[in-house]
Amino acid sequence: MNTSQHSGQGYQHRDNLFIDAPLLTFIEQQLLANSSVASSQFFEALSVLVEEFGGTYRRLNQNNNEMACEDHLQQCQKSTQAPTSINISRGSSKAILDEYSCAIPSCILDVLTTTMIAKQQDMMLSLSTSNPEEAELMEAVFKRAHDLMGLTKQHIEVIRPVDNVACIAQARQRAEYAEPQAMVSHG
């Protein structure tokens, strides 16, 4: 994909990334409008997150779904309208291309937009994940996003998935251990 062609067809260049023009307008005029975070800081943070976590996320999530520019823009808009829910998508987003003209993992943009929304609303949001590896990655991405944006207060917590089999086994072990002790008499 030739980014110079795309740049003329609705993509704008920011910090080694090519951003779909309507999404760029939304980020600058709506998401960051009432924020102390500058547009340059937001896109620099996004570029760093893509560089640091993009490859890991692509390896972890082999989902080949690509989200269209319009779909990702609509998802971002819905998140700002209903800030109590976190919308983290899977796959990649054509709304932002990296320096090699590859669609970035969509969750990285979602992490940054969610962080901004939670900060603006001064709320704490929780995110449940489907597996421990994903939880670990998302914790690292959210932490790094907070650092890059200069935020001192954590606004997102990642809830690790519960291993039901392990929980049941531990409960049985405790029940078996507790039962014999209850029958022992020290008379």
Image (spheres, rainbow, N blue to C red):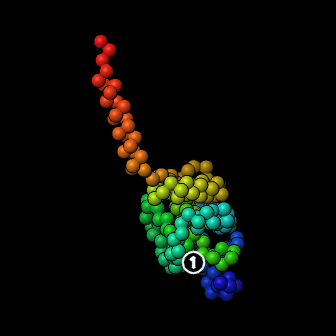
User: In percent of the image, x 64 and y 54: which residue is there?
Assistant: 147
- Element under label 1? strand
Q: Position of residue 128 (x, y in %)?
A: 45, 56
Residue at 54% over, 69% down: 62
Q: Residue furthest top?
A: 187
Mark 1 lies on residue: 94
Q: Is residue 112 visible?
A: yes
Q: Quadrant of residue 94?
A: bottom right
Q: Nearer the viewer, residue 147 or 168?
A: 168
As drawn, 13 above or below 151: below
Quarter of image, res 105: bottom right
Question: Where is 40 relative to 181, above or below?
Answer: below
Residue 1 or residue 56, whichever sits in front: 56
Quarter of the image with the N terminus in it: bottom right
Percent coordinates x, y for residue 178 in the rendering: 34, 30
Instruction: Give the residue drawn at x 63%, y 76%.
Output: 102
Assess disc 1: are there few (<14), some (14-19) or many (≥20) residues with their C-alpha within 10 Å of its C-alpha: many
Q: Position of residue 41 (x, y in %)?
A: 67, 63
Which quarter of the image is occupied by the C terminus?
Answer: top left
- Look at the picture and state if 164 lies above or below 105: above
Q: Residue at 60% of width from left, 75% of height from top?
A: 103
Where residue 52 appears, as percent x and y from the top left, is 66, 62
Specify the amino acid type for callout 1. Answer: Lys
Q: Is residue 166 above or below residue 26?
A: above
